[in-house]
Every structure is written in structure tokens, then in C-alpha cells.
Image (cartoon, coloured by chain):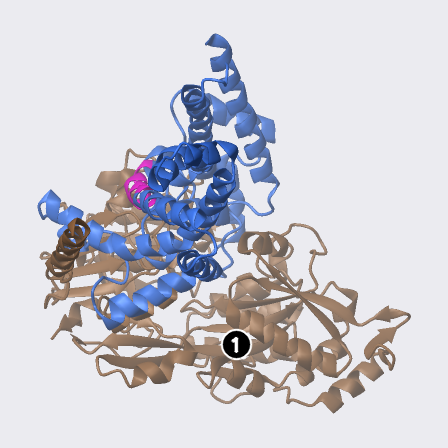
Amino acid sequence: MIKSILSFITMLLLITMVSFGIMRMAPGDPTQQFLSPKMGAEDMVQIRKNYGLDDPLPVQYIKWLKNVMQGNLGYSYSTGKPVLTAIVERLPATLILSITSLSCIILIACPLGLFSGANPNKPFDYTVTLLSLITMAMPAFWIGLMLILLFSLKFDLFPTSGYLDPLMSGEPLWRQWLDIAHHLILPLATTVIGGVAGLIRFNRFNVITIIAQDYIKAARARGLGEGRILLKHAFKNASLPIVTILGLSLPDLIGGSLVIEYIFSWPGMGQLGIAAVFQRDYPILMGTVLITSILILTGNRLADMAYRWVDPRIQS
Amino acid sequence: MKFNRFLVLILSVATLFVSACSKSPNSTASDTLNLNIGGEPTILNPILATDAPSSEINGLVFSGLFRINTDMSIVPDLVATYSISTDGLTYTFKLRDNVKWHDGQPFTADDVKFTFDKILDPKTNTVRRSNYLLNGKPIQFTVVDTHIITATLPESNAPFLSNLCMSIIPKHILENQDINTATFNRQPIGTGPFKFQKWDTGQFIILVKNDTYYLKGPKLGRIIAKIIPDTKTALVALEKQEIDSGKIPFKDIEKYQNNTKLNVHEFEDLNYTFMAFNLKNPIFKDIKVRQAIAHAIDKKGLTDKILKGHGSPAHIPAAPISWSYPNNPTFPIFEYNPTQSARLLDQAGWQLNPATKIREKNGKQLSFTLITNQGNQDRERSAQIIQQYLSAIGIQMNIQLMEWSSFVKRINSPTDPKPFDAVMLGWSLDIDPDDTSIWHSKEYPKGFNFIAYNNLQVDTLLDQGRKTIDQNKRKIIYSKLYTQIASDIPYIFLYYPNVITGINKRVKGLSPAGPAGLFNPIENVYIQ
């Protein structure tokens, strides 16, 4: 137990140290944002000094680390907001979109993949394959825009963009939730259309491989019904690799999706992260790195534990 | 059967849901103006903010000692009357005495002093400090009475009044706080026509009418400033009337001119796009090469292709709508004349190599790299067209697109010479024509004269223009300045792009279209 905590902390230190280094190797700095005759060049020098960017890199890292240990992630350079606030206030929108879309993707991809895999090269399989290939070829920004043009502008079913209507804040909570859900449909559809195809293809291939195995033949020989073989015997094994993939996509849940957020003005983490990269907002970047790496490390730990539970052959 | 029932249930729930919330409440209410500020504002503190979305909100919540009028003249705002001493060094301002902060506290001269002292404080992360330092010496603000304040300048300074358009911040709130991180920066309290009400990160800011505004109160009850970063989504939102105002791209103008819900306004702005030469580069040291390039570019053709007729070719570093633009132009205009270019290059010793079609001198090719920032399509396309023009006269121009921060870092590099050959960029000009920071030789290598332009006569004219208060005299000085700069060709001035805005027809009370804004003053705007 102590060993695993120690390795956790060492990993965290290494990740943040390397990220800090890489981040600072990128050309530019937070004061190199303004190119306007109305702003003084010498003022940038003063701001650099105020941020402590003139100190040697290791000193800056240790300063940051010391603050983090005291629970202080610092303040954003561009907004002056506490880093933790800046991250936490974007979590709800991010999680709502990522969790619903992941659920929808699984709910659609698993059955479709299973049935196409079980009946390969039949009309149903061809249709699913064709549709998957088409949606895979469509970029998300294009799908998003098409959905906006069709369902928002033409049919007027949904708002073009946004999260919660500005005038909804005084309404009862259920009305607010309904309004968020209403705004959610188009970005959700865009994410699902873009994300479902890959998983279908993956699942289909798994099912085809598994159905060819001896234990399935044995099950058929025992006279089990095709449905039971598919759902009980094949699906369980086919879903194992999917669990791995989902485990790997855990950090994406809080990472947000820039393209979708941008098109639909969705107030998620993707926009925060990208803005921080372009503005060289180091405190925000380090804050996101720290939080995501904690999540990834924890996620990995959890996945390890889950494997041991699912598959007794894996020993600690 | 079971499945069918399930499907019917889902469909009916969905229909109910869509009909329940497809109409949002009141957002097109008769007293609410819906704007799109295009991006998340960084900081709602006028002395710290540098981005357009923040400035747009700050302009509604705060007010300054002076403000910019529709005709771009500078008129008193928080100031009732003022006088200037005969030597032009002491300004005395009598402030309005009926002004209250949004929290009810009275506005006094102490707030004014506090604001400018905070800007001058090195601990404040502001890029505006240098506006209030003249030759390194700060402008002194002295409180004489609760509503009288004087400013003492170390030397005469014409742009001073335009710098007093800076919004004033409340002393009683910020006095004992770290201004860089104060919560005030997200919940501003000002003296302007609108009060801050709510900011939902990444979504919108709501402002409501200030009932105790010192001037004629605003007709609007509320402004909702939405944050829609994607320009295509914003256009759809404009069409759907989710927002009342939006920028329209040149290529879409005809489509929106025929839209029955929108009025399309087009106006000239205070900015120009240019291509600049690093004058420390051996190729560009020779004015013949610069002249050859100037004659090789068909500015009219370029403007037509890029701006589709919504703009005009530029010849000097001032916009035609600025008062400083010469009435009787004496500046040189470099006509499109590739034959002349070829002759100039021959004279400069650059001979065409028929095999490569590139000119050479002493075994060196006439080749250079133009850098510009990624993501600005007009600039990228302009660079490509110029590449063609130059290739026709035997100059090889490579184009390198750079991410903004890396680009700025390269231009601002403190080294001499700087690590670039040529740059394509645009300048957004101030209301005051003082361009010392761009052209003065002391602004190199630290400063915005990143091309190392050095002309003693230009320096003198800039200093004169900065110190002369009389506008007519300044106009003569700037006319000479522009002629001198244009003849030296440190930049190729390319074009002035117009701005095209679509405004919903329900919005009334607009001022004539111009850089000072259609919603200026906002108090006149109403919804019908």
C-alpha cells in the first residue's frame, strides 16, 4: 500500500516536471500576446517580472510545487482567477456532454457491432458498415454545422448554441435542466455521430473473431440457441477489450472536446485548455496537467483492480 | 408489440420536450439587446483588460473622464468642465458632482487619482503604464477638492486627452486588494450606463440598466452579451434572431443584404494591413529593391480579390477617416508597373537567372521569407497573391505561417538584427494619430519599430506631432510625416478593410456607422 502511494507521488512529480519543461520550451510567453501600438513594450517586461518568469526554470518549478503543497494552484495570468475555480466552473458542462455522449455511443455501438458481427456480410452488416464509413469520413465541425443549419435554422427545433438560456437562471431547477438538455441535443448528436462508428467497427471485428472460436462451436454442438450463444457467451468476451478502450478514454471525460464546444458555444474544458495553450497561461496549464494526471493515475489503478475482479487469472 | 409501444413513448416524450422548451422566455423581450462578444472576456477591469470582448463589456459598465463621440472627437464624460494652462502642462478638471458608483457610493476625484496611480504602479499587470509616462516621468495627478483634480505633465503631450478616455475604477472597493486577482475583476462596479449583473463562464454576461446614471438614462432595460466563438454559428444565430448584431464576412454580404430581418451597415475602420521589411536584412537595405517590390504589387487588384470591393488600397500609415489623413495628398503612390520593377532590380545589380527564373547577385538568390500569423485567411491569401506578383519579377518569396504567440515572440525578439526577413500584419490605430511607438528609431530593438526604421527627420516630426496641441498644426506635421515614410518604403501599405455589420431591424436609435460604434452612445439604442 505504502509502496503504491509512493510510486503514485513519484509519477505525479515526474509528470508535472516534464510538463513544466515542455510547456516552457514552446516559443512565446504570456506577455508576448499583444502587438498593438497602443500598448507599451516596456510594460511587457514589467509584467514578466511580476509573474516571476525571469527566475531560472527550476526555481519557478519549485515555487509552483511549494504552492501546490499548500493547496494553492495559483492564479490564471490572463483572467486573474484562481486556477481551481477556473477548472471547476467548467466541469459540469464538460461532464454532462462527455458522460451522455459516452453512454449513447456504448448503447448504440454495442448492439450494432454485435449484430453485424454475428451476421457478417449480410444486408444489415453492409448497411451498418457503409453508414459507419460515411460518418467516420465526416469531420465533426461539418456535422455540427449541418445539424445547426437543419435542425436549428430550418426546422427551428433547437437553439443554435449555448448551454443554459441567460434568462433561465431564476426558473425552477427542473426547467433549467430541461433547458440544458434542449441545448445538449445537437452537440450530443454531433459527438455521437462522430464517435460511434469506430466502436461499431471494433466491436464487429471482435465478435467475428470470437464466434469462430471452438467454445462457441462447442456451445452450438450442445444445442444452445443462437441468441443465448451471442448474448451470454460471445458478447461477454467481446466486451473485455471495449472495457480497456473505455478505461483509456476516462481522461477524455474531463478533457472536453474543443471542436464541439467551439461550434456550439458549449462552456467546457476544451476551450479553457486551448485558450491557455495559446495564451501561454502557465498556471492554468499546470493546473489541468496536475488534475488530469491524478485522474489518469487513479483510473489506471481502478482498471487494474477491475481486471483482477473480472478475470481471476490476473494476479497482483 | 412491446417495442412499438416503447417507441411511441419515446417519441411522445421527445415531442413534448422539444415543444416545452423550443421557445426560451423573454430573450427577444422589447427592452433586451442581445449581443455576441465573440469570446470569453478575460478580465472586467478596464486598466488590465487587453481583449476585445472585455473592452466591449467594460465600455458599457465603466466611464472615463472623456469619451469618444460618434464623429470620433473626444468629448468630456465624467468631466464637467476643464481648462489647460497656457504652457500646456497643467490640466484642471472639474468633475460632475452627481455621479454615483453602481453600489451607491459617490464618485470623487480620489477615484480618478487612484485609477491613474494604480496604472503607474509597477505591481499592476497593465500594458498601459507607458501611456502615462512621458520620457520616463509619470504624469502627476493631484486632488484639489472632492470634485476637482489637476494633472501635471512633464512635457506637452497631444495624445493626453485621448488617454483620459481610460475608464475610472472605484477606490473604495479596490484600495486594499491585489488588483491583479481581485474578485472585482469578475464582478465589476462602475459608473457607466449599465450595471453588471451576472457572468456565466463561457456562456453570457448580463447587464442591466443603471437607473442612477448621470446622463440621460438608457432606453434599454438589459443587455445580454453572449459568447459565441464560432463565426459560422454566430451568423446562424444572427439569422435566427438569437443575437441582434453580428459581423458579416465580405463573401456573404449579398446574402444578408436581402435578409428581411437585417440592416447591413458598412463602414471604414481605423486599421490597415501591410507588409513590412526587416531593414537590417542586406536585401532590403537597398531602397531600389523596396521600390521594385512596391511597383510589382497591384494593390487595386489585391484589394478587389481579398476584400471584394469592401475596402480600399492603402498608401500611408493613416486611415482615410482619421482627421490626420492629408486633404491634399503629397505622398508618393507606387503604381503597378512590373517593367519598372525589373529595371530597378537590374540597376540594383540583381540579374535574372533564366534557368531558375530567380534573380541573383554575387551568386546569392533574391529570396526571402515572409512570416504572418496563422488563422487570418485574408492575410494568408494576400501573402499568396503577393508571392505571385513577386515571382513575376524574379523574386522568390516563401511564406511561413506561425502560431500567434511564437510569431509575436519572433517579432519582439530583443536581438539585433531580428530573426525575420519580412512580416505581414495589420495595425489597429488609436483615435490619436501619434505613431511614435511604430516609427520612432528609439523603439528599436525594444518596441514596435521591429523593422529597424531609422530616419532622423521622421523622429523629429513624430516628436513635434506629439508635443503640438493645435490640431491644424498637427495635421500639417503628420502630412509631412506620412509623405516621408511612404517615400522610404519601410512598409508596403496594402489595404484598409471595411467592417460590415448586420443589425436586426428591431434595434433602433443607432448612430451613423463608423469606428466609434453603431451603439454609441448606447443610451439612445432601443428595441421596437
* Whether residue B380 is situated above or below residue B411 in the rendered picture: below
Could you say which is closer to the camera, residue B96 or residue B527?
Answer: B527
Left or right of A10 on screen, residue B226: left
Point 47% across, 8% down: residue: A2
Left or right of A110 on screen, residue B454: right
Could you say which is closer to the camera, residue A106 or residue B448?
Answer: A106
Specify the chain shown as blue: A
x, y (%) of residue B415?
A: 69, 51
* Res. B374 image quadrant: bottom right
x, y (%) of residue A101?
A: 33, 47
x, y (%) of residue A305?
A: 43, 20
* Whether residue A3 is situated above or below residue B481 in the rendered picture: above
* Res. B11 image quadrant: bottom left
Specify the chain shown as brown: B
Q: Residue furthest top?
A: A2
Segment colored magenta? A88-99
Left or right of A53 on screen, residue A240: left
x, y (%) of residue A209?
A: 52, 41
Could you say which is closer to the camera, residue B446 or residue A57?
Answer: A57
Could you say which is closer to the camera, residue A213 or residue A38?
Answer: A213
Report if residue A96 lies within the magenta region: yes
Please, which chain is the residue tagged with disc 1 on? Answer: B
Q: Amino acid at mark 1?
A: Ile
* Res. B82 image quadrant: bottom left
Point 38% across, 79% down: residue: B252
Give the SS element for disc 1. Answer: helix
Name the residue that disc number 1 marks: B477
- Category of crowding for the residue at label 1, using alpha-carbon neighbours closer than 10 angstroms: few (below 14), some (14–19), many (at least 20): many
Report if residue A146 lies within the magenta region: no
Point 29% across, 76% down: residue: B502
